[in-house]
Amino acid sequence: MPVTESNLRRLGAWALLIALGLNLRPLLSSISPLLMDIRDATGMSFKSSAWLTGLPVVCMGLVALFGIRLEARLGQRRGVALGLAMILLACAARLLFSQANALLTTALLGGAGVALIQALVPGLIKQQFQQRVALAMGVYSASLMGGGGLAALFSPWVANHFGQWQAGLGVWLIPAALALLLWWRLPFSARPKVSTRSPDAFWHNRRAWLLALYFGLVNCGYMSMVAWLPAYYLQLGWSATQSGTLLAFMTIFQVIAALLMPALAQRQTDRRLLLAISLSAQAIGFAGLALWPLQAPQLWVALIGFGLGACFALSLILTLDHRRDPQQAGQLAAFVQGIGFLINALSPWMSGWLRELTGSFVSAWWVLIITVLTMLILTRRFSPGSYREAPPATACAVHAG
């Protein structure tokens, strides 16, 4: 097949989607395998160190809620570039500074950058991959989770190689710089500045809130895993490298699910069965982690990873299903992610608080099991008929029911 401008543009779009996704989780997942070294150096408690992963998620939520206005002001091209630059600066600062306050500041800075990109990408996908939205969302989700796994795997190795934990955190400025270069150099039809619809329509809409709460609760286990899974196994006698490898192992199954389940979703309009399978996998995995952590850790982590990887992609696909217009779909996704990530931000803090209260992370795993089972019941509400059976003039609307 000859290399045409159209083919080059398509390849560039896929390459950029992968590059963006890879940069959205190292800021979080590089912390946990090095947590003991960070706590020893800074004197942070379990609860306060949870904010190293919690604060970026708070930023993801708050920035996403303003995503409509931010896109209107910046446009996709400048908005994504600004987000990558903020991630790059946060990683560079982590390489240079080791104080607790500096780390928390980088969590805010980098988290805002991640949030800005995440707020813009769903609309970008709806615009750029109109006939392959589910597949593109799967590739994006897989890249996002793959970046988190690579950071969990390589951060301890880099820290050991250079003899300082700061190197394990700061090394992720390199992929951020490469992604920023790709974003400006490769051809991509980013949407220019857009007119903004009032976000009040979402704040007063029951279905938008239901989607937001659902997105937040089906995905909150990921933040607890990133923050505390290595720490859980460090307390059980594993080394930092072993525990980081376990988190990377979980990521393999996140990536598999993020590619497989959206590909299956591409063939049907009802997402409920796939969501039910994904939530069931999470529940079984968390139960194994609580009851038999040393008997089959790889199995429990694989189930959790598969469930989380699928739920992230499928819950965003479900959100995009509610709007046909790319701009409106992106705005709804920004609202859903905004509320959802604020819910996610409570998860690592809650797990750290329960760890200090009970002396174990097991109680946190049980809270996540109850949450997942509740969401499994709620999944029944998302029949395609609840958002597809509308008169032509309002077919794109998000219904209250």
Image (tube, rainbow, N blue to C red):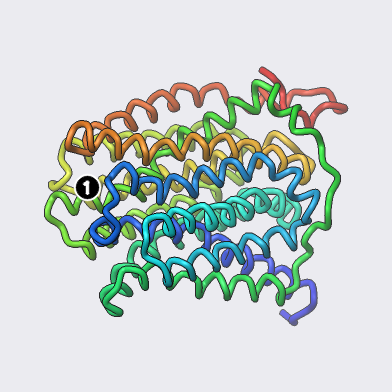
Hey, what amino acid is under mark 1?
Tyr
The relative height of residue 183 versus residue 148 in the rendered view (above or below) is below
Pinpoint residue 140: horizontal percent, then vertical percent: 57, 56
What residue is drawn where x is 76% and y is 46%?
Answer: 326
**Which one is nearer the viewer's eye here, 304 or 54?**
54
What residue is drawn where x is 75% and y is 27%?
Answer: 201
Pinpoint residue 188: horizontal percent, then vertical percent: 75, 67
| Quarter of the view holding residue 269 | top right
Screen quadrant of the C terminus: top right
Mark 1 crowdedness (10 Å alpha carbons): few <14, some 14-19, many ≥20: many
Pinpoint residue 43: horizontal percent, then vertical percent: 26, 53
The answer to whether residue 376 is seen in the rendering is yes
Q: Farthest residue in the top direction?
A: 401
**Which one is nearer the viewer's eye here, 290 or 285?**
290
Tally of numbered discs: 1
| Quarter of the view holding residue 367 | top left
What residue is drawn where x is 33% and y is 74%?
Answer: 158
Horizontal side of 79 relative to 118 (left or right) equals right
Secondary structure of the residue carrying numbered label 1 = helix
The relative height of residue 382 versus residue 149 in the rendered view (above or below) is above
What residue is drawn where x is 37% and y is 41%?
Answer: 348
Screen quadrant of the N terminus: bottom right
Horizontal side of 58 relative to 308 (left or right) equals right
Pinpoint residue 382: horizontal percent, then vertical percent: 58, 26
The relative height of residue 305 versus residue 106 in the rendered view (above or below) is above
The answer to whether residue 333 is seen in the rendering is no
| Residue matched to label 1 | 232
Q: Farthest residue in the bottom direction?
A: 2
**Which one is nearer the viewer's eye here, 259 or 27?**
27
